[in-house]
């Protein structure tokens, strides 16, 4: 199997029809708006604009009475309507702004009615603050229960950007409750999880009676075989590494926010059809690099990365970036041949067929231009000295090769002016993989970071060294008041037991491409290896490429996909799980299925043809490369599909920025304008 074949996701590969969740989110928003009669002014929390843009558009809001829209920000609010609706997360800073605007209106003798729609649920803290501000009686408090948002056919996200920081830096467990509610909703809509690995909070949620309206909307349409929940802290190494898949590298170097990416406006301009304007990727280009498209500094536009309108993206997103150029050139050659063949039409019928195909060719042509342009932007970034030195340090640290030399290289990166996120990620990676950095060396490195990037980063360094994070620790570890030592991450033992490293050399290239390690050019994400421990045990013990090779040498015939084995928990990998920090919870639920969900006679006669769905939930966020790796696992077996759920999409940079309080550009607005 080639890397191109590995990473192509077809529409039919989706685990369940998650588009229903988008319909529910849209319906709930409409119902919340309709609860306020008449024209209304919507005041929106900017952090919700991106998530809402994935489920609705401005035209729908206007159709349901929204006359004007404003961002929720400090200062006076001039509303053209008497009804004002605030849509925001239940944060103290937001409630203070709302209370101030209400009090301003009261002093100006303005007669308004106020409604607060809190996402995803009502908070007692909000009522308490409003009461302290003296405006509780002036506001109607309700909720808009925005839960999982489909960001791909097989990926659901709460789009909660700060979940990691809130959980393990601030100690705020609200997102844990929200996650449990969202997973509970999945059970109500699609069927129960027979086996769960999460805290008891989820089991308390599942004991609640299903919501009648939700059940009326959807009957159980899929059968889950298990829910695997991964606390992000069980694998902090993976997000610290530079992602090497197309979508992951795009997130690293350009930035993807709520499934949108900012691109030069020229890349979104449809090209003129015909042979006079051939596809952007030249067939004369080397197979290993995409064609060069000159990109000048110009106005940028937000573009929604979705396979619904861009099938080429489905073929590219999970590829290791080294294979993207070959794929683009293949598509370019095929399009060029299609144009030439169709232009040689002679009869009226042939011409009619060509005209019918022209729209599809133009769409493919435009997608090729876009991704060739994006690839060229990525190529220019990957050729910098800082990028390559960072990648080399990462690979050496994963192999525990001359750790002291890697520390020296990190100091050189500081001197070269590398981004703060790159330096801190490498320091944390060195600490986790090596069991800590020598105390004196670490203090010197911290001093250099503060002097080079600002003393405002001191809280960041303190948080990374806290017991809850344990990402930047000295070696030896100092004793703490409550225990003599803080546990080190057992990377060395996991590297062997989980087969994390595979040599990325020409002789082992097939082995890398036939393993989840293709996502990092020879390194297998620990998180996805743990998923394999539950759902594809053979993939952890040995490489599927070796089995394929043995089959070919034996009789030249491939056995194809292997039937997925039943979920039996961590059996066979108890020792591996025991050394990983944190508690492992394995719960078997007693499920009483309704008559409509009982197995049919057909399913009993042909049990091997039944397909189940395994849900993998990342508490604290997951990366695009982990998604790509799980998709790869799903394609190796018959009878099991994966549905990936997460609190949000993360990268090493977003984790560091979130803890440091560094704000990045806002995500996409709802389709339409904020007036």
Image (cartoon, rainbow, N blue to C red):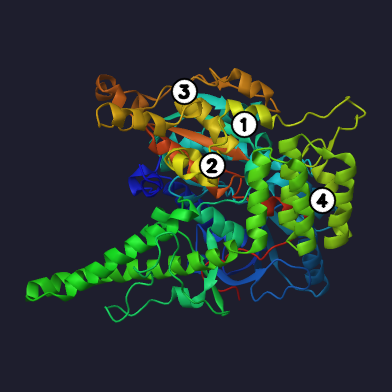
Distance between mark 4 and mark 3 Cα atoms? 40 Å
**Could you tell which of marks 1 and 2 lies nearer the N-terminus?**
1
Please identify the quadrant where the C terminus is shown.
bottom right
Nearer to us: label 2 or label 3: 2
- Left/right of residue 337 with respect to residue 4 in the rendered view: left
Distance between mark 3 and mark 1 Cα atoms? 24 Å
Vertical placement of 15 versus 534: above or below? Answer: below
Residue drawn at x 45%, y 21% is: 592
- SS at mark 4 in the image: helix
**Could you tell which of marks 4 and 3 lies nearer the N-terminus?**
4
Residue where numbered disc 2 is placed: 522
Mark 4 and mark 3 residues within 8 Å of each other at the beta carbon: no
Residue where numbered disc 3 is placed: 567
Residue drawn at x 65%, y 40% is: 398
Q: Which mark is residue 495?
A: 1
Residue where numbered disc 4 is placed: 460
Nearer to us: label 2 or label 4: 2
Q: Position of residue 121 (x, y in %)?
A: 65, 46
- Number of marks present in the image shown: 4
Mark 2 and mark 3 residues within 8 Å of each other at the beta carbon: no
Distance between mark 1 and mark 2 Cα atoms? 12 Å
- Left/right of residue 99 with respect to residue 510 in the rendered view: right
- SS at mark 2 in the image: loop
């Amino acid at each position: 199997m080639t890397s191109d074949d590995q990473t192509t996701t077809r529409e039919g590969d989706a685990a369940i029809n998650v588009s229903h969740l988008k319909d529910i989110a849209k319906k709930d928003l409409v119902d919340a708006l309709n609860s306020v009669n008449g024209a209304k002014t919507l005041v929106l929390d900017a952090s919700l604009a991106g998530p809402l843009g994935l489920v609705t558009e401005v035209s729908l809001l206007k159709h349901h009475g929204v006359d004007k829209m404003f961002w929720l920000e400090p200062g006076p609010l001039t509303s053209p309507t008497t009804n004002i609706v605030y849509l925001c997360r239940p944060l103290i800073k937001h409630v203070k702004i709302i209370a101030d605007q209400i009090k301003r209106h009261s002093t100006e003798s303005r007669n308004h009615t106020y409604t607060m729609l809190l996402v995803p649920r009502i908070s007692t803290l909000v009522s308490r603050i409003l009461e302290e501000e003296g405006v509780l009686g002036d506001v109607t408090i309700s909720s808009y229960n925005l839960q999982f948002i489909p960001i791909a056919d097989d990926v659901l996200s709460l789009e909660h950007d700060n979940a990691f920081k809130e959980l393990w830096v601030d100690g705020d467990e609200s997102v844990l409750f929200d996650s449990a509610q969202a997973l509970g909703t999945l059970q109500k809509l699609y069927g129960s999880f027979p086996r769960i690995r999460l805290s008891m909070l989820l089991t308390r949620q599942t004991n609640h009676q299903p919501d009648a309206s939700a059940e009326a909307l959807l009957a159980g349409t899929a059968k889950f075989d298990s829910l695997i929940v991964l606390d992000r802290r069980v694998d902090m190494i993976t997000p610290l590494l530079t992602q090497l898949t197309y979508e992951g590298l795009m997130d690293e170097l350009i930035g993807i926010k709520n499934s949108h990416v900012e691109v030069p406006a020229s890349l979104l301009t449809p090209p003129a059809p015909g042979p006079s304007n051939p596809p952007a990727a030249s067939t004369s280009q080397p197979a290993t690099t995409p064609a060069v498209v000159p990109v000048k500094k110009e106005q940028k536009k937000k573009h929604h990365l979705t396979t619904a309108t861009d099938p080429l993206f489905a073929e590219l997103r999970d590829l290791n970036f080294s294979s993207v150029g070959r794929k683009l050139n293949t598509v370019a050659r095929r399009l060029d041949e299609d144009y030439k063949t169709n232009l040689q039409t002679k009869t009226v019928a042939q011409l009619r067929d060509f005209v019918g195909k022209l729209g599809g060719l133009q769409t493919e042509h435009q997608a090729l231009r876009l991704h060739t342009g994006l690839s060229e932007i990525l190529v220019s970034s990957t050729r910098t000295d800082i990028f390559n030195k960072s990648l080399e340090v990462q690979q050496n640290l994963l192999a525990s090769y001359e750790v002291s030399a890697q520390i020296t290289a990190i100091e050189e990166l500081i001197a070269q002016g590398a981004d703060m996120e790159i330096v801190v990620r490498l320091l944390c990676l060195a600490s986790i993989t090596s069991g800590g950095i020598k105390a004196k060396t670490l203090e010197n490195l911290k001093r250099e970071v503060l002097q080079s990037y600002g003393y405002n980063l001191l809280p960041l360094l303190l948080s990374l060294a806290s017991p809850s994070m344990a990402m930047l620790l000295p070696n030896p570890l100092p004793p703490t008041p409550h225990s003599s030592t803080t546990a080190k991450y057992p990377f060395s033992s996991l590297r062997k037991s989980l087969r994390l490293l595979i040599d990325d050399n020409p002789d082992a290239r097939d082995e890398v491409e036939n393993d989840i390690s293709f996502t990092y050019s020879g390194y297998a994400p620990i998180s996805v290896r743990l998923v394999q421990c539950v759902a594809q045990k053979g993939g952890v013990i040995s490489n599927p490429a070796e089995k394929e090779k043995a089959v070919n040498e034996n009789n030249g015939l491939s056995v194809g996909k292997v039937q997925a084995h039943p979920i039996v928990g961590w059996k066979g990998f108890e020792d591996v799980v025991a050394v990983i920090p944190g508690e492992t919870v394995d719960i078997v639920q007693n499920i009483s299925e309704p008559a409509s969900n009982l197995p049919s006679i057909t399913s009993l006669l042909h049990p091997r043809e039944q397909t189940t769905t395994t849900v993998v939930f990342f508490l604290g966020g997951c990366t695009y490369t982990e998604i790509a790796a799980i998709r790869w696992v799903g394609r190796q077996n018959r009878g099991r599909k994966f549905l990936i759920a997460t609190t949000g999409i993360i990268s090493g940079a977003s984790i560091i920025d979130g803890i440091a309080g560094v704000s990045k550009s806002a995500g996409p607005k709802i389709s339409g304008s904020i007036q």
